[in-house]
Protein backbone atom coordinates (compact mmCIF):
# COMPACT_ATOMS: atom_id res chain seq x y z
CA UNK A 1 0.00 0.00 0.00
CA UNK A 2 2.77 2.45 0.95
CA UNK A 3 6.44 2.75 0.20
CA UNK A 4 8.86 2.22 3.08
CA UNK A 5 9.24 5.99 3.48
CA UNK A 6 5.48 6.56 3.51
CA UNK A 7 5.09 3.84 6.15
CA UNK A 8 7.61 5.67 8.32
CA UNK A 9 5.68 8.92 7.88
CA UNK A 10 2.38 7.21 8.80
CA UNK A 11 3.97 5.62 11.88
CA UNK A 12 5.46 8.99 12.87
CA UNK A 13 2.08 10.72 12.62
CA UNK A 14 0.43 7.91 14.59
CA UNK A 15 3.06 8.14 17.32
CA UNK A 16 2.61 11.91 17.45
CA UNK A 17 -1.20 11.62 17.65
CA UNK A 18 -0.92 9.04 20.43
CA UNK A 19 0.75 11.63 22.66
CA UNK A 20 -2.70 13.12 23.27
CA UNK A 21 -5.00 11.10 25.53
CA UNK A 22 -7.99 11.33 23.17
CA UNK A 23 -11.46 10.46 24.44
CA UNK A 24 -13.37 9.61 21.26
CA UNK A 25 -12.74 8.25 17.77
CA UNK A 26 -15.55 9.29 15.39
CA UNK A 27 -16.47 8.51 11.82
CA UNK A 28 -18.77 10.92 9.98
CA UNK A 29 -20.52 9.76 6.80
CA UNK A 30 -22.64 12.39 5.07
CA UNK A 31 -26.18 12.03 3.70
CA UNK A 32 -25.07 13.19 0.27
CA UNK A 33 -21.98 12.89 -1.88
CA UNK A 34 -19.63 15.51 -0.50
CA UNK A 35 -16.71 16.58 -2.66
CA UNK A 36 -13.35 17.48 -1.10
CA UNK A 37 -13.80 21.27 -1.22
CA UNK A 38 -17.25 20.96 0.34
CA UNK A 39 -15.86 18.65 2.99
CA UNK A 40 -13.14 21.12 3.88
CA UNK A 41 -15.68 23.95 4.23
CA UNK A 42 -17.89 21.73 6.41
CA UNK A 43 -15.00 20.90 8.71
CA UNK A 44 -13.98 24.56 8.96
CA UNK A 45 -17.58 25.22 9.99
CA UNK A 46 -17.37 22.51 12.66
CA UNK A 47 -14.16 24.07 13.98
CA UNK A 48 -15.74 27.55 14.05
CA UNK A 49 -18.83 26.22 15.80
CA UNK A 50 -16.81 24.41 18.49
CA UNK A 51 -14.68 27.48 19.13
CA UNK A 52 -17.82 29.61 19.52
CA UNK A 53 -18.99 27.37 22.37
CA UNK A 54 -15.96 28.19 24.51
CA UNK A 55 -15.51 24.49 25.31
CA UNK A 56 -12.15 23.08 26.31
CA UNK A 57 -11.42 20.63 23.50
CA UNK A 58 -8.93 19.28 21.01
CA UNK A 59 -9.83 17.77 17.64
CA UNK A 60 -7.83 16.15 14.87
CA UNK A 61 -9.74 15.33 11.70
CA UNK A 62 -8.85 13.78 8.38
CA UNK A 63 -10.90 13.51 5.21
CA UNK A 64 -11.07 10.15 3.48
CA UNK A 65 -12.19 9.60 -0.10
CA UNK A 66 -14.75 6.86 -0.56
CA UNK A 67 -14.41 4.21 -3.22
CA UNK A 68 -13.91 5.61 -6.69
CA UNK A 69 -13.35 9.09 -5.19
CA UNK A 70 -17.00 10.07 -5.71
CA UNK A 71 -17.44 11.35 -2.20
CA UNK A 72 -15.68 11.87 1.12
CA UNK A 73 -16.19 11.25 4.79
CA UNK A 74 -14.24 12.12 7.93
CA UNK A 75 -12.50 10.48 10.84
CA UNK A 76 -11.97 12.49 14.02
CA UNK A 77 -10.05 12.18 17.25
CA UNK A 78 -11.72 14.20 20.00
CA UNK A 79 -10.66 15.29 23.47
CA UNK A 80 -13.05 17.10 25.79
CA UNK A 81 -16.29 16.43 27.56
CA UNK A 82 -19.27 16.33 25.22
CA UNK A 83 -17.37 17.45 22.12
CA UNK A 84 -18.67 14.53 20.07
CA UNK A 85 -22.25 15.54 20.89
CA UNK A 86 -21.59 19.09 19.72
CA UNK A 87 -19.99 17.91 16.47
CA UNK A 88 -23.01 15.70 15.84
CA UNK A 89 -25.46 18.47 16.76
CA UNK A 90 -23.80 20.91 14.35
CA UNK A 91 -23.79 18.45 11.43
CA UNK A 92 -27.39 17.35 12.05
CA UNK A 93 -28.52 20.97 12.37
CA UNK A 94 -27.01 21.66 8.92
CA UNK A 95 -28.85 18.61 7.49
CA UNK A 96 -25.57 16.93 6.55
CA UNK A 97 -25.94 13.66 8.45
CA UNK A 98 -28.64 11.29 9.65
CA UNK A 99 -27.61 8.20 11.58
CA UNK A 100 -24.28 7.68 9.86
CA UNK A 101 -22.06 9.01 12.59
CA UNK A 102 -20.26 6.71 14.94
CA UNK A 103 -18.51 7.64 18.18
CA UNK A 104 -16.33 5.06 19.90
CA UNK A 105 -14.09 5.27 22.95
CA UNK A 106 -10.57 6.04 21.80
CA UNK A 107 -8.14 3.15 21.51
CA UNK A 108 -4.50 3.42 20.56
CA UNK A 109 -5.07 1.84 17.13
CA UNK A 110 -7.33 4.73 16.09
CA UNK A 111 -4.30 7.00 15.74
CA UNK A 112 -2.73 4.62 13.25
CA UNK A 113 -6.04 4.20 11.42
CA UNK A 114 -6.34 7.96 10.98
CA UNK A 115 -2.66 8.49 10.17
CA UNK A 116 -2.78 6.08 7.24
CA UNK A 117 -4.70 8.69 5.21
CA UNK A 118 -2.10 11.41 5.68
CA UNK A 119 0.14 10.14 2.88
CA UNK A 120 -2.67 10.50 0.36
CA UNK A 121 -1.84 13.47 -1.87
CA UNK A 122 -5.53 14.46 -1.75
CA UNK A 123 -5.82 14.34 2.03
CA UNK A 124 -7.21 17.26 3.97
CA UNK A 125 -6.70 17.34 7.71
CA UNK A 126 -6.33 19.70 10.62
CA UNK A 127 -5.81 19.84 14.34
CA UNK A 128 -7.47 22.43 16.50
CA UNK A 129 -7.42 23.09 20.21
CA UNK A 130 -9.35 25.64 22.22
CA UNK A 131 -7.39 27.96 24.45
Image (tube, rainbow, N blue to C red):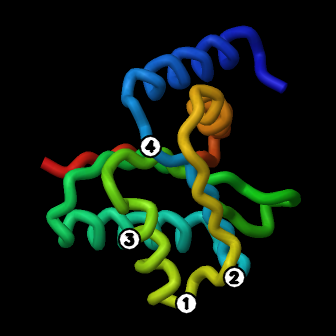
Query: Mark 2 and mark 1: span between their CA atoms?
Result: 8 Å
Q: Residue at x 52, y 50 (%)?
A: 76
**Total residue callouts:** 4
C-beta proximity under 8 Å, tags 3 and 1: no
C-beta proximity under 8 Å, tags 2 and 1: yes
Asked which secondary structure carries label 1, the reply is loop
Please rate how many residues cluster around mark 3, counting C-alpha atoms within 10 Å: few if below 14, some from 14 to 19, many from 20.
some
Which sits in the foreground, 96 or 37?
96
Residue corresponding to mark 1:
95
Ranked by sequence position, the earlier of labels 3 and 4 is 4
Asked which secondary structure carries label 2, the reply is loop
Q: Can residue 129 be seen here? A: yes
C-beta proximity under 8 Å, tags 1 and 4: no
Q: Residue at x 48, y 64 (%)?
A: 40
- Image coords of residue 41 (percent x, y): 44, 70
C-beta proximity under 8 Å, tags 3 and 2: no
Residue corresponding to mark 2:
31
Compared with 21, 121 (above or below) is: below
Residue corresponding to mark 3:
86
Amino acid sequence: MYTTQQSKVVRGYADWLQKTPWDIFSTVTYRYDIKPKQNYRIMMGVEEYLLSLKLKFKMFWVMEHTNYKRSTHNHLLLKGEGVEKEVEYHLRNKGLITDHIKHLPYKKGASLYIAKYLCDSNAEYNIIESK
